[in-house]
Amino acid sequence: VRGMSAESRYLRFFTSRVDEADVAARLAAAEARGGVGVVAEDEHGRIVGHAHLSSLEDSPPEMAVAVADDLRGQGLGPNLLEVLGAVAEVRGAHSYRARVLMSNQAMLKALRRIGCAVMERHPGVVEVLVATRGGMPGWPSGEHDRPRVLVEGTSLFGSLEDELLRGGGYEAMFCPGAPRGSPCALVATGRCPLAAGADLIVCGFPLDATHEPILAAHRRSHPRIPVCLEVKSVATVPADLPGGVVPVPSPSRPGLFVEAVERALGRQGAEAEREHPGRGSSEGHPGIVDS
Ligand SMILES: CC(C)(COP(=O)(O)OP(=O)(O)OC[C@H]1O[C@@H](n2cnc3c(N)ncnc32)[C@H](O)[C@@H]1OP(=O)(O)O)[C@@H](O)C(=O)NCCC(=O)NCCS
């Protein structure tokens, strides 16, 4: 805590009024509640970073991490998270959550490199899920009673689809893309834990050379899971849309977007494929208007 500026303290604790003794006592007591933490020391034994998970009995536990100001930007934070993840994995935790201020560019960059999915959005704060063993996380464990929609996009910012769908009674996760520098696991291996556990997939990315293989991999690897593709207008519905892919309007028209997703989820992917083999898209593209 001593090596952190007021700004770093605010980013870590969401308040800059931090009592050192109180933090030390809370972290020391955390293990008794099932928490786990790791620290980094410099050659003089000074603690220069820590990463911590609240009780591993929480599903998922909450993570916090901090690095001394003079050592930021050298990869120590992600290293601490890798070690913390390995410890947690051995103890049976497969993912953890982190609440991050949208203004915390350093942490968001570190998370994009590690890999994460958005599970909640609050004003100014994004709550992400991270896999303890790296790569993309799966859905949080436990029972779920709401349909699960995986939304895919290109940036952690500005995507409203997942929040709109949560408001509409769905459990939604947002994938901003593979960990930076790694290929998309679905395209490379045919396996993505988020896609495999979804009842519906909404692709909010542009259908360009980077993203076309992802859409194709969804149809190949999970042919029974319906896939929606966001389009701006009828004119932009691709003529060669892969079978089983339903065009839906962009979330700039929130009501139409949620209704179209609802319709796509109502009709089972396999049934649609039987009705319109190889065609996929619904006639007239309901909900999509000319712009
Ligand atoms: C977030 C944090 C843990 C990341 O650890 P780190 O060791 O700095 O991570 P990295 O070395 O991977 O750097 C991540 C990014 O931080 C940025 N960064 C480095 N030093 C920085 C600084 N002093 N101020 C702002 N950003 C900085 C770099 O741009 C880097 O991105 P790049 O690789 O594209 O250049 C660390 O910056 C920190 O302790 N921040 C304050 C506390 C905090 O925000 N905790 C997270 C609460 S959820």
Image (cartoon, rainbow, N blue to C red):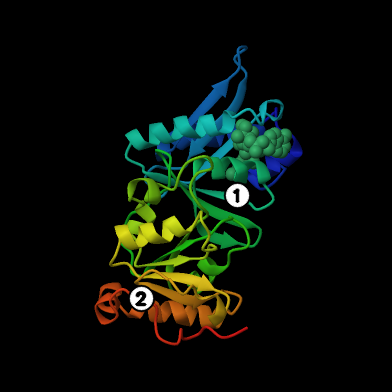
| Residue position for label 1 | 100
Q: Determine whether 184 is above or below 90 in the image.
A: below
| Residue position for label 2 | 280
Q: Which marked residue is nearer to the observer: mark 1 or mark 2? A: 2
Q: Sort mark 2 into few (<14), some (14-19) or many (20+) by Cα contacts within 10 Å.
A: many
Q: Amino acid at mark 2?
A: Gly
Residue 230 image offset from top left, x and y in percent: 51, 71
Location of the C terminus (image quadrant): bottom right
Q: CA distance from mark 1 to mark 2?
A: 39 Å
Badge 1 residue CB within 8 Å of ligand 1: yes
Q: Name the residue at the top extreme.
A: 44
Q: Determine whether 67 is above or below 11 in the image.
A: above
**Circle 1 SS class:** strand
Q: Amino acid at mark 1?
A: Val
Viewer-closest of 248 and 58: 248
Quadrant of residue 106 within the rendered picture: top right
